[in-house]
Image (cartoon, helix red, strand yellow):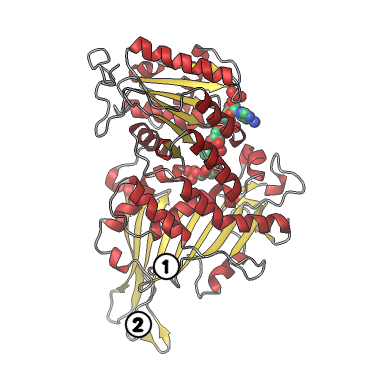
Amino acid sequence: MSPDIDEARHPFLKGLSKHRGAPPTVVVIFGASGDLTARKLVPAIFNLGVDNLLPGEFHLIGFGRKPIADEDFRVMMDEAIAEHSRRPLNKEIWERVRQNMSYHSGGYDEAAAFDSLAEKINQIEKDLGRDMQRMFYVSTPPSVFEPIIENLGSSGMAQAHVHTKLASKVVIEKPFGRDLESARELNKVINGVFEEPQVYRIDHYLGKETVQDLLVQRFSNSIFEPLWNREYIDCVQITVAESLGVGSRGGYYDTSGALRDMIQNHTMQLVALTAMEPPVSLDPESIRDEKVKVIKAIQPLKLDVDGGDVVRARYTNGLVKGEPVKGYAEEQGIPEDSSTETYAAMRLAINNWRWQGVPFYIRSGKRMARRASEIAIQFKRPPGILFSEGDKFNVAANTMVISIQPDEGVTIVMNSKIPGLETRTQPVKMHFRYSTTFGSNTPEAYERLILDAMVGDSTLFIRGDETEASWKLVTPVLEDWEQCGVHGLKEYTAGSWGPLESERLLWERGHQWR
Ligand code: NDP
Ligand code: BG6
């Protein structure tokens, strides 16, 4: 069988890649009746079709426990696109993806269901007269990650095609374990079936345009890199704030909390990209090597309710954007004895040549004043010789704020002379806004990630040792919190910027949150 695309037979899908071509592919989504498939995955696939980026031969199989007829699944996905796609439904394009969609029912731990899935894929290949790459997207709750992987192994679907070498790969959703031990165990199961280059662990923050731009900002501009170190930087503040509460996800969230849900993965990725050394090249392993190195250089956190490096809290009722909202304890599905945090902040010390002595403050929470993810680099003040009045030094520290979302862009705060006959200074802002420069309809994170996984580019996915390094840092904190229960769990009013106690992390080093 030839892996080449038969352009004559598939005019719409011919040469579907503008830049990089994915081979003929069958995508199987496990958990396809779920929320993520409808809200993100299938709309992303549709938008890749609109951009002419799907491979020449493309099949999508949904897999789940409930029996769903093929046509019913297609209708569910029609509705998903109508509701969640960033671009309106283009019937002609969607129809061409849709006609190659089907549903396969079975248990995630049922070997026979995987054997019949393998037969279905073989039949698709037979009908097309060629091998297909197989991409298994695991989008179920984590309790069934392991049986799915094991069944992919025992059914023979994890292996590459013998002659054409077309790959088999697995994409795994978060959460990747609950602590260091379970992450190691999951890595062991996965690596028992798949080779590491076949594994794509998702962190959707890496698919965001602004997160990818961090590397470009840092390593394609000669004005920033010489300053990016302990000589010039006073502190780094990373905020990932949401105004939303836990909504209907209380059941899941209460078993997770802010540290597992946001800090161990998304926020830690922002730390790694901000602090890593320049990679020797842009190939995936060079970038991931540097990220792992810097995560490993973060010092163990000091755990002490009143004076340590971490603060946790949960929201009480309050006003968000002028609307009254419930406290976490009253949300649907939260047990009475819950001690889960909806906010976590940490002071990190990175013990390497570049960063020694520069605190990295990170925080993430739900029901905060507004949605804002940003990285603020605060530079050291210039010498206080000029521009002072009496003993008061009048010049503010320079800051570079990289806004990940919303209102994506970069702002540099610098000092300027206030026009007039006296010499007085004022901080002023220089803005770069993505929407003004590039327009606002940029690809969703999942579009980039699904395309990269199909093409075989793992740069924006988490390597096994990377996830373990991050769990190694946060697991002692989780264990400590578990032991303490509600003791040490602070409170903050919904709609605020978090608990007062998190200010302490900064005050102790002469800083304050921006
Ligand atoms: P859902 O809770 O919607 O579950 C997905 C599907 O898995 C369900 O439709 C169901 O399919 C099956 N399922 C549900 N519960 C169980 C269970 N206890 N045992 C076995 N199968 C079950 O999940 P989401 O779609 O929201 O999320 C999927 C994955 O993506 C999760 O790992 C989640 O953490 C991750 N994720 C989700 C995000 C989101 O916004 N939704 C964001 C980031 C990550 P069936 O009954 O047909 O088998
Ligand atoms: C998910 C978390 O990984 O990220 C959610 O499970 C959170 O709790 C979401 O709301 C935030 O993603 P984004 O892209 O909206 O910042």
Q: Nearer the viewer, residue 432 or 40?
A: 40
Can residue 179 be seen in the rendering of this structure? Answer: no
Judging by the rendered image, the residue that carries numbered circle 2 is: 383
SS assignment at label 2: loop
Q: Secondary structure at mark 1?
A: loop
Which quadrant holds residue 165? top left
398 on left or right of 475: left
Q: Position of residue 280 (x, y in %)?
A: 28, 55
Q: Residue 148, position in %: x, y?
A: 55, 29
Identified at 47% across, 14% down, the residue is: 119
Q: Quadrant of ligand 1?
A: top right
Q: CA distance from mark 1 to mark 2?
A: 26 Å
Q: Nearer the viewer, residue 298 or 110?
A: 110
Relative height, residue 23 to residue 402 (above, below): above
Residue 290 x, y percent position in the rendering:
38, 55
Does the image show residue 204? Answer: yes
On-image quarter of the N terminus: top left
Residue 415, above or below 248? below
Q: Residue at x 49, y 38 (%)?
A: 191
Q: Label 1: which residue?
A: 352
